[in-house]
Image (cartoon, helix red, strand yellow):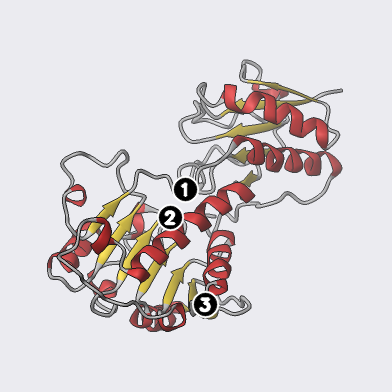
Amino acid sequence: MAVRVGFAAGASAWPEYQVPLARALAEVGVVAEVSTLLDDPASVDYLVVAPGGGIEDFSAFVNAKAVLSLWAGVEKIVGNATLTQPLCRMVDPDLTQGMVEYVVGNVLRHHLGLDRYIRGGTGWDQQVPPLSRERSVVILGLGALGQACAAALMALGFPVTGWSRSAKSVPGVACVSGEDGLQAALRRAEILVTLLPKTPETEGMLDARRLGWLSDGAVIINPGRGALIDDDALLAALDAGRLGHATLDVFRVEPLPASHRYWSHPRVTVTPHIAADTRAESAARVVAENIRRGEAGEPFLHLVDRALGY
């Protein structure tokens, strides 16, 4: 009997996922019927979702063995009281690679001071940058994305400090945790990369007080979550010339309103949430593997801890 998989990630996503998902399920030996028609929720064994996919009430999916998100961040659904099924977030190798490329590219851009040349310098302005081993990079968040970015940066010679809410040990990374560890990390950051999930504990985490711990001229790169940063506090620090630059890929409101000061600020680079997108081919393989695991009675990959919110 075929496993019934409901696809509720939005009508526009279905053409992109239909063939890769069928192929990935066949590759792991799962006979499945995948459909966007969810007129009989009780018959659905697995539900593939994304925010805005059309489901707000999960209570009718009484036999669903898991809800499989196509997004790495689950803050839009983890608090839904009707979602009582196991919830798995997306940890996708291609998504991770995309994030690594974005972070490394922007770290190198700021490290080398390329903006002064790209935007047109004033004459023969020879400002020779330090070597990578002389530039301290701090990453907030040591999950799959943070660890992958740390490894890539260390391979280029950057000393990397990583902060996480709970203590972690990552080879080669100076790992710190807790409020004292956060203060120590921010004080040593010349380039700060924020890769934390959005939770009640991380929202507005980089406020005026904590931004004040950063050294003069420090650069912030935020491809994590827009809500991590107090926008007014960041703009004040940039206006005062205390911080060197902010490269921002995520925002509290997206698309970023045309009237927002980030667009015109000379010390801000806006990118339109392009750092790490879910790609259908690789994401379909992650979904298929979790369905195979569910049918085999094995633990799901990337199961969300409801208490932590990720």
Whether residue 88 is visible to the viewer of this picture, yes or no, is: yes
The residue carrying mark 1 is 75
Q: For this view, does 79 lie left or right of residue 135?
A: right
| Element on which disc 1 rests | loop
* Image location of residue 280, percent across then percent down: 61, 35
Disc 1 to disc 2, how far (Cα)?
6 Å
- Which amino acid type corresponds to the residue marked 1 in the rendered image? Glu
Q: For this view, does 149 lie left or right of residue 303?
A: left
The residue carrying mark 3 is 157
Depth order, front residue of 305/130:
130
Residue shown at the point (45%, 68%) measured from the top left: 140
Disc 3 to disc 2, how far (Cα)?
30 Å
| Element on which disc 3 rests | loop
The residue carrying mark 2 is 198
Q: For this view, does 203 lie left or right of residue 209?
A: right
129 is higher (above) or lower (below) than 13: below
Q: Are marks 1 and 2 in contact (CB under 8 Å)?
A: yes
129 is higher (above) or lower (below) than 34: below
Residue shown at the point (56%, 48%) measured from the top left: 95
